[in-house]
């Protein structure tokens, strides 16, 4: 499924960028190409 694939890609980006960016990825900012973590 596409959703599962995007989750894997987002996880790889989070690992590459570090824990600070991972929060933004978890909140779905990766889909909007905005890697700034949300509060």
Image (tube, rainbow, N blue to C red):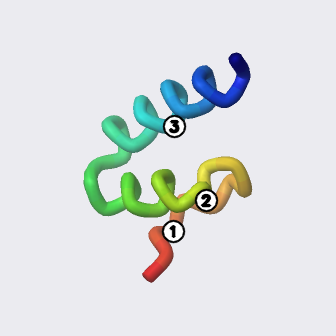
Q: Upstream in the sequence, badge 3 or badge 2?
A: 3
Q: Are marks 1 and 2 in contact (CB under 8 Å)?
A: yes
Closer to the chain start, of discs 1 and 3, is: 3
Q: Label 3: which residue?
A: 10
CA distance separating discs 1 and 3: 13 Å
Disc 3 to disc 2, how far (Cα)? 10 Å
Residue located 46% across and 69% down the image:
37
* Residue that badge 1 annotates: 36
| Nearer-the-camera pick, 7 or 20 | 7
Q: Looking at the rendered structure, which numbered label has been put on residue 29?
A: 2
Q: Position of residue 34 (x, y in %)?
A: 63, 61
Q: How many other residues sit within 10 Å of disc 3, few (<14), some (14-19) or many (≥20)?
A: many
Q: Residue at x 61, y 59 (%)?
A: 29
Q: Nearer the viewer, mark 1 or mark 2?
A: 2
Q: Position of residue 20 (x, y in %)?
A: 31, 62
In the picture as drawn, the residue positioned furthest to the front comes out as 1
């Amino acid at each position: 499924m596409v959703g599962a694939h995007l989750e894997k890609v987002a996880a790889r980006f989070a690992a590459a960028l570090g824990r600070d960016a991972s929060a933004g990825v978890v909140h779905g900012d990766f889909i909007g190409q905005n890697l700034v973590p949300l509060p």
